[in-house]
Image (tube, helix red, strand yellow):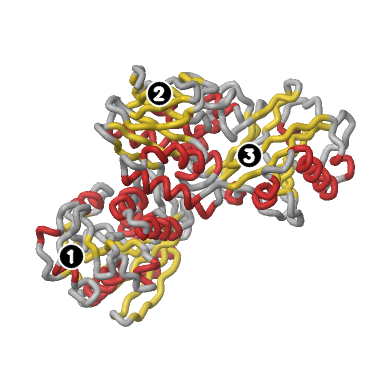
Amino acid sequence: MTVPVTSLQDLVERDRDHECEGFGSAKVCVRVVGVAELPTRFGAFRIVGFWNNRDAKEHIAIIKGDVLGADAVPARLHSECLTGDVLGSLRCDCRDQLIMALKKISAEPYGVVLYLRQEGRGIGLLNKIRAYSLQDQGLDTVEANLALGFRDDERDYAIAAHMLQSLTIRSVQLMTNNPKKVGALESYGIDVRGRLPHLIPPNPHNRFYLETKANRSGHFIDFGGKPRLTEQHDLVMVDGMPDALVEKE
Amino acid sequence: MTAHEVRDVIVVGAGVAGLAAAHRLKEAGRAPLVLTSGRGIGGRCATWRLDGQPVDYGVGFLHGVDPELVAAIHSVGDATPIPGWPRHVEGRGTPCQPRAFAPQSARLAYAEGVSAFPKWLARDLEVRRQTTVERLALGDAGIVLTLASGEQLCGRDVILAMAGPQAETLLVPLVEDSDEVDAARRLLAMLGALPSLTVMAAYDPGTPEPPFEMLYPEDSALLQTVAHDSSKRKAPRALVLVLQALPRWSRAHLDTPPETWERMLLDEAGRLIAPWVRAPSVTRTHRWKWARVDAGCELSQPLLIPLGAGFRLGVAGELFAPGGGVEAAWLSGHRLAGRMLESRPS
């Protein structure tokens, strides 16, 4: 690396012709292509745009504070979910999880949310809608197994690992409820200094997690009668929920 | 139920998806048996012989971006690759697989015809031809396949590798046994497949050579592509064009007598190219009822459904991987075999 990196903006120049062997079996290689201020209702961040050299997908990192060369950076992986993140769908808890992650890192000296453009965790928006359609026909367990069950976690973690490396982050504290996910990131050479449980606060829409038990297939049925799905990398944990209901993945 | 031999793996369908799966399983020490209703193998990777001259009447050329697929299509023995075909492309119409022309995409044909690829995949495989599977059922020793002949076969693992609507039909009797199969069937019902009526047309020596290798007409309501097929051949004896109709038009004419739509497609090609195109010396038609998958329908992964006492039903095909066409078919079969080996090595 010949270009000195003293600010996030320098990453763009450094990565202008970046091309490496890639991470994971898909040989994912990303490069930083743009950095900008991003004031949000959850705090002031910077947004770093990544381009995937191999499949032309765009990914982003939302950053608080000076993370270059930093240790034990709180980090959350979030998979794009148009229906949840943008439309406020109640078929998943993606929006609550995303907002909570942004609020948490906003309150820290530094932190990062890696927003992976893997809609429905890689199955794509149209197939997610087809999966919901199967669910509407009464096929709940299957829906998860069949349509959302083959999510490409490996790819997500490969992308995330490369993004963290591109940002010169030395080590992270992974915001996840699933201890197994720590190892997934470590296998790509990322130093994980610990795990921060990702609790979301109770609200009228997720109150049922505190009041009902998971149904026979391990899914929570919400008040609208629709199974709630975990479209992120870990199971949902609502503050106050009994632990027994959580770590079963 | 009659006594039957229990096989390790039975693959139903000898297109690229089924052969890719069987090839990988065989390399890993498994013993797959491949069944196909056809007389030949390769499915839509199909080559006809016109007095010995190959004519590709399904897939016109292979293409892809996946490094493993690209390596596989370049390593076919007994075949002369024509890298980059088609190089001379005319027309601003939509190709069947627009991604074939993306900058990273490798394109390739073979002088011997595109069926060289499935033949290469099948070179060490046990393939039973003209064997139609009529029905699946769950038995005590595995998944029981009832053939059109009445014979029954049984496999501990069964892979369905065929067009989506065909797989959907075969899944119906297993719906009672498994919610996953029910979901798979309903999922397939949502997806469907696109038809394409195809005319192969050969012309007498001395006919002028068209200036293109592939034509994608932008102003036709009938034709999606015209392939200058003989441009792939070493010293072709005849000029051969392959006309393939648009999905919508094809669907409207699926039940029309072939001589009717053949005439309409030849006239349309004549209008688009030159009058001589209307009058070939030899023609042949093929009705692809399930020619390809619509790009909006592709799924991310093949299906692998556990059934009964440790038996598994896999479903692969062009639908079950990104990229469309031969790339998706190959990837789905290759990945399905990989998953089957991971969970139950030989």
- The residue labelled by disc 2 is B32
Q: Nearer the viewer, residue A113 or A231?
A: A231
| Front: mark 2 or 1 | 2
Give the spatial CA distance, label 1 vs label 3. Answer: 51 Å
Q: Quadrant of the N terminus of chain B?
A: top left
Q: Position of residue B179 (x, y in %)?
A: 32, 46
Three-letter amino acid code at the position of disc 1: Met
Residue A7 vertical placement versus A178 (above, below): below
Q: Position of residue B18 (x, y in %)?
A: 47, 31
What's under tag 3, amino acid-wise? Trp
Q: Are marks 1 and 3 on the same chain?
A: no
Q: Position of residue B23 (x, y in %)?
A: 44, 26
> What is the number of the mark on residue B288?
3
Q: Are marks 2 and 1 on the same chain?
A: no
Mark 1 residue crowding within 10 angstroms, few (<14) / some (14–19) / many (20+): many
Q: Look at the image and tell me in which quarter the C terminus of chain B lies.
A: top left
Q: Is residue A21 at all visible to an observer of this figure?
A: no
Q: Position of residue B308 (x, y in %)?
A: 27, 34
- Mark number for residue A237? 1
- Residue occupying image coordinates x 48% and y 52%: B190
For image coordinates 51% across by 43% down, the residue present is: B165
Which chain's residue wears label 1?
A
> Spatial distance from mark 2 to mark 3, Cα to Cα?
28 Å
Output the chain of dot 3: B
Which quadrant would residue B48 be assigned to in this image?
top right
- Vertical position of residue A35 compared to residue B86: above or below: below
Output the chain of dot 2. B
Q: In this rendering, would A200 be left or right of B223?
A: left
Q: Is residue B148 above or below residue B334?
A: above
- Horizontal relation, residue B229 to residue A148: left or right: right
Q: Secondary structure at mark 2?
A: strand
Q: Badge 2 local density, few (<14 within 10 Å), some, or many (20+)?
A: many
